[in-house]
Image (cartoon, grey):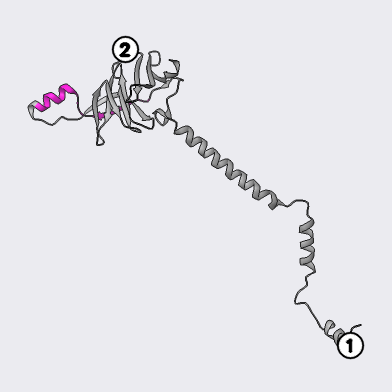
Amino acid sequence: MLDQESVKAYRSMHLTRDLRQDILMQHADKHAPLRVQSFLRPAAALCSLVLIAGVLIISAFHNRPGAYMGGGRIEADPKPAVMEAVPYTGGVMRVSLFSLSGEENPPQTAEECIPLSLRYGHDVSVSVNGGILLLPGTGEELSYAGSFGEVRNGHTAYWSVHGCEEMSPLTAEITDFSGNVIDTITLTYHAADGMWLIANTQSDK
């Protein structure tokens, strides 16, 4: 049995604030069937995972080895070829004539050039059976290469097909330095629409 001193001490105790509301809220939280936060965190994590996976898949798709034109990989399905006019230097006859006269070889402009960005993870060789190749040199200038040349990985070769409509179809063969054919790019002139169609026909062989 408590003595009178203890009873007085107990009765004199006062809480600084009412804890009843806090206790009730904690009880409600523990017994709530499902909370919104319990869904939000896993859902956000799942969305992040899906987004990262999507970025990786798209990146892998766009970085596949092959010949690219206008940002897209050249596939088996024929598409209209991108055409550009580009400046270049060289040409065997012109170089010889200007060298003999002591004059500097001036730049020229090639019409109807198709940009081929070659991304195979290694350097390649390119040969064409119609038109001419303009290849990047040590600087930013393009040089006349005739129908054959070597292209460093990731660099862009320009295939000029100006005036070659009667020779259609034209092909560009891409090989490694061991002579193995990696890709065959085919250009076909569509007279009705007045355009060149480009496709990777290596899979047809």
- 195 lies left or right of 60: left
Labels 2 and 1: the sequence-earlier one: 1
Magenta residues?
Answer: 82-99
Mark 2 surroundings: few (<14), some (14-19) or many (≥20) residues within 10 A:
few
Mark 1 surroundings: few (<14), some (14-19) or many (≥20) residues within 10 A:
few
Figure quadrant of the C terminus? top left
Measured as percent of width and height from the top left, residue 124 is found at 33, 27
Q: Is residue 106 magenta?
A: no
Residue at 80% in and 81% down = 13
Q: Is residue 18 above or below residue 118?
A: below
- 96 lies left or right of 32: left
Label tally: 2
Which residue carries the number 1 mark?
A: 4
Measured as percent of width and height from the top left, residue 174 is found at 35, 23
- 22 lies left or right of 102: right
Please identify the residue farthest to the front as the structure is shown: 178
Residue situated in front as seen by the camera: 112 or 157? 157
Mark 1 falls on what kind of element? helix
Please identify the residue farthest to the right as the structure is shown: 1
Please identify the residue farthest to the left as the structure is shown: 101
Measured as percent of width and height from the top left, residue 125 is found at 31, 25
Residue situated in front as seen by the camera: 115 or 152? 152
Residue at 89% in and 87% down = 4
Q: Is residue 43 above or below residue 166?
A: below
- Marks 2/1: CA–CA distance: 119 Å
Front tag of 2 and 1: 1
Residue at 15% in and 29% down = 105
Report the amino acid beneath label 2.
Answer: Met
Report the amino acid beneath label 1.
Answer: Gln
Residue at 77% in and 58% down = 30
Which residue carries the number 2 mark?
A: 167
Residue situated in front as seen by the camera: 59 or 195? 59
